[in-house]
Image: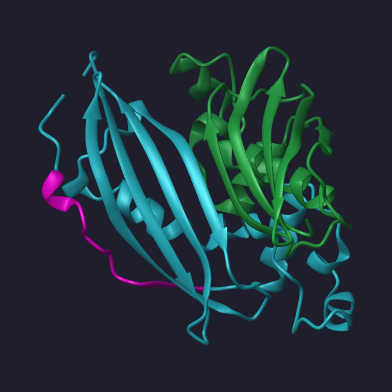
Chain colours: A green, B cyan
Amino acid sequence: MTLAPGDQIELRVTPDRYVTVRYAGASGDFNPIHIDEEFARQVGLPGRILHGLWSMAQVARAATEAAGGDPLALRALSAQFRGMGRLEEEIVVSGEVRSVQDGVATARLEARQGDARLIRNAVAELRGG
Amino acid sequence: MPPLPTDQIGRAYPADTYAVGREKVREYAAAVGETNPLHFDPAVARDAGYADVLAPAMFVVVYCSRPFLTALFDPELAIDFAHLVHGAQEFRWAQPVVAGDEITTILTVRDISERAGLRFDTFETVSRNQRGETTCVGTWSTIIRAGEEG
């Protein structure tokens, strides 16, 4: 798979209502804002919110799939966390390959959910350019 | 905002070793929606040249979780959890991680600063496998809002 500048990246995923529970167990991040509806509301959130690193993992998946699916294609990924991710609402990860040099493609990505940008200014370096 | 514990900048925490288990790799891969059989099926992974199932790149958060939480809960850093958010994250991967690996991570406090009423902390993790090869370097940035309500 050869990536070229201008290549578009897109991944759509809808987190189901228990994804934060599974991710808490898988990752070890049991912050109650992700798994306890009552606690989340008590601290002023609209309800349980997604883990930022789960959302970043969706950006990693989108970049990896764009590179042909080799899990080792992803050499580096940076991201800024912004809006709070909600359950049961579709997330759209989108991006574009900006440059390719010495077989390494650099892509810019973001993750949106409705009007909220959950992840912005993400930069992925991918082998396979 | 209380005085910043800037004397902690440069501090490295004791090394933490994480044993990567096959079922943990599968559990993590499923939780983030991975479908590549390299993450789930040891036979497929072996055919591809790996000793066992391959961890997804972002599995780094699993083997770095304990060092990161140790720093966040360290009284010396005086982190106000009620106002803590994860601001940014960066990972650079160097070597694949497979089930059976033992990953040793050292976390260092890189920076503590204050700007516009917000406290910014930056941590670096360097993780190496049992052969001493670097698997991933992470930069973890947190933001603490001023706690007006105490």
**Residue located at (56% from left, 39% from top):** A79
Residue A24 as seen in the image, left or right of residue B51:
left
* Above or below for B109 versus B47: above
Position of residue B43 measured from the top left corner of the image (x, y, whole percent): 88, 80
Identify the residue at the far bottom of this view. Answer: B131
Can residue A51 be seen in this snapshot? no
Q: Quadrant of the C terminus of chain A?
A: bottom right
Please name whichever residue, B54 or A11, is drawn nearer the observer in this view of the structure.
A11
**Residue located at (65% from left, 37% from top):** A55
Please name whichever residue, A11 or B43, is drawn nearer the observer in this view of the structure.
A11
* Residue B119, quarter of the rendered image: top left
How many discs mark residues in the rendered view?
0
Identify the residue at the far front of this view. Answer: A101
Please name whichever residue, B74 or B44, is drawn nearer the observer in this view of the structure.
B44
Residue B46 included in the magenta stretch of the image: no
Position of residue B89 measured from the top left corner of the image (x, y, whole percent): 49, 44
* Above or below for B109 versus B24: above
Please name whichever residue, B39 or A122, is drawn nearer the observer in this view of the structure.
A122
Magenta span of residues? B6-18
